[in-house]
Image (spheres, coloured by chain):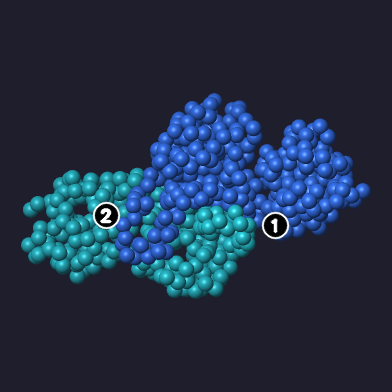
Chain colours: A cyan, B blue
Amino acid sequence: MADTVLIYSRFPKAMMARIAQRFELIDAAGKPPADSFNAEQLAGVRALITAGGQPLGRDVLDTLPALGAIICYGTGYDGVDLKAAADRAIVVGNSPAANASAVADLAMTLLLAVTRRLLPADAYVRSGGWAQAQPSPLLRPPRGLPGRRIGVYGMGEIGRKIAARAAVFETEVAYHSRSRHGVPYPYYPSLAALVEWCDVLMIAVRAGADTQHIIDAAMLRRLGADGTLINISRGSVIDQAALLAALTDNAIAGAGLDVFEVEPHAPDALSALPNVVLTPHIGGHTQEAHVAMQDCVIENLASFFDGRPLPYAVK
Amino acid sequence: MADTVLIYSRFPKAMMARIAQRFELIDAAGKPPADSFNAEQLAGVRALITAGGQPLGRDVLDTLPALGAIICYGTGYDGVDLKAAADRAIVVGNSPAANASAVADLAMTLLLAVTRRLLPADAYVRSGGWAQAQPSPLLRPPRGLPGRRIGVYGMGEIGRKIAARAAVFETEVAYHSRSRHGVPYPYYPSLAALVEWCDVLMIAVRAGADTQHIIDAAMLRRLGADGTLINISRGSVIDQAALLAALTDNAIAGAGLDVFEVEPHAPDALSALPNVVLTPHIGGHTQEAHVAMQDCVIENLASFFDGRPLPYAVK
């Protein structure tokens, strides 16, 4: 049986180039594999590479009888039906922490851009509004970062790096996660209490059924009219309709979003708002992060095909 | 003689509101004071408030025979003819460090936005390009911040705060200034050597005749095709025509600019570039920074009218 690896999600070719040097790849490009390949081809697939957020359930696994490994490109694996995989003794791997710095940097980019109203500021210069001394209500002096209370939700590698970065901007940092960590920030045992306390909520929690829409209308009211929401985790964590309403009604001040409920798609109503910064899920999208994620994918695949345990296994 | 204070530069009314509660203000709004006020009124002016970058020379001082204090709103005083002031024993004050955190935060905002191509990324989402999976050459994975060499030019309060912020992003930081400081970063005794070494040049130097156009075509070639330039100091430090050519020819990778040679004005050719982020001199423009700068102005004026030395005097 050849070492055939199915590319399950839609990835740019360049991201797979290093992996293609080591393994025989067949590319389903985000469609159901049975749409592109016949039963014989699918029967030769022993491993697949997926973007962890894309749904990958029992129905797809049933079309891949020889599958033994699901390798997520990136940190997340929320789309993978872990129970269905376990029932078939399919191992699941990811790229833990490989993109943590890049994602934390983007979280700070979004926070700073929202705080300092970077998009309206740049537009004011480019449009000639500055040269013509036009009134610029969007550019009234904003509150700066020093002294702000930054609540980090989730204290994995990404949450830690966000907290370290945010703290150097002369802010107060606190966090909530399922359990207390050995980090130098106050711990809030409930998310509601953290959100009540903070001015800025940075979402860095691992997505899953337990966090689905955990940021809802009530939580946004707790964040308050001076509050800012940053999400670089998964769109599913936020009730996007409630967020849209809160931003429209100025129930919160602004948001920076790299992830959305249905990707690749940000609702038109969100795109029309001036108090948001929107990026197309590029948190882990740097040259170094891609190389690090590819290293994890390659090591996971090599170990699997050698019959060894995955070095980067999802527990 | 009343405590009349002339507002020399053009400031939004809101910025002067707290000062107006303490002092009698008359507003020249950026025009020569003699255009707005008669000789008797000008003879009553014992102090003025200026934006430190605006030219304030002997010709203007000659129209203010009773002037005893020039108070700069902000850190800079590069526009003030210090020799002419000294000849008349006019004291000069500023607001040192009052806006340092805000300016350093904007420097980081610009660096992160340029590095992660925030403007094209947001435009890609809002335009629907992402939803339609359009090719996005501007959004190819960029180099991230970790591992980059950050050169800080100038090690005053703002330079120190930029260095501390940049270091937490897992970068290497080094600096050049006229003299070595007690900071934990390598010192380069020449600017050229620092620029040769670094990938990112952050300009935080005090502007003056000695720094006029110090960043010229040769210095930009040293920065190199992968180099990024951030300026939150003064436009005069950079030869703007040379910068425009370097950005157009990809002799450097990108720039984030809060200051320009002639303000309020960014050349159209600069505004047309995709690899720049431009802001309308908003470095110190946060609520907290304005309050801190106003505190310095008020304390300087109160001391001057009481016949005491300025607490925040330019040396």
Q: Which residue is mark 1?
A: B12
Does residue B132 lie above or below B64 as drawn? below
Q: How many marks?
A: 2
A216 or B73: nearer the viewer:
B73
Q: Which chain hosts label 2?
A: A
Does residue B99 lie above or below B239 as drawn? below
Check disc 1 and give the amino acid type. Answer: Pro
Q: Are marks 1 and 2 in contact (CB under 8 Å)?
A: no
Q: Position of residue B140 (x, y in %)?
A: 34, 50
Q: Position of residue B145 (x, y in %)?
A: 43, 44
Left or right, B95 with respect to B283, comes to right
Instruction: Residue at 41% x, 52% y: name it.
Output: A103
SS assignment at label 1: loop
SS assignment at label 2: loop
Instruction: Residue at 55% x, 71% y: name it.
Output: A251
Left or right, B44 with respect to B51, comes to right
Check disc 2 and give the amino acid type. Answer: Pro
Q: Which residue is mark 2?
A: A12
Crowdedness near tag 1: few (<14), some (14–19) or many (≥20) residues, C-alpha within 10 Å: few
B224 or B104: nearer the viewer:
B224
Q: Which chain hosts label 1?
A: B
Marks 1/2: CA–CA distance:
49 Å
Task: Pick the quarter of the image with the C terminus of chain B.
Answer: top right
Instruction: Residue at 45% x, 55% y: name it.
Output: B119
Q: Residue furthest right?
A: B1
* Quadrant of res A249: bottom right
Q: Position of residue B99 (x, y in %)?
A: 65, 47
Q: Which tag is nearer the camera, tag 1 or tag 2?
A: 1
Left or right, B17 with respect to A159, comes to right
Crowdedness near tag 2: few (<14), some (14–19) or many (≥20) residues, C-alpha within 10 Å: few
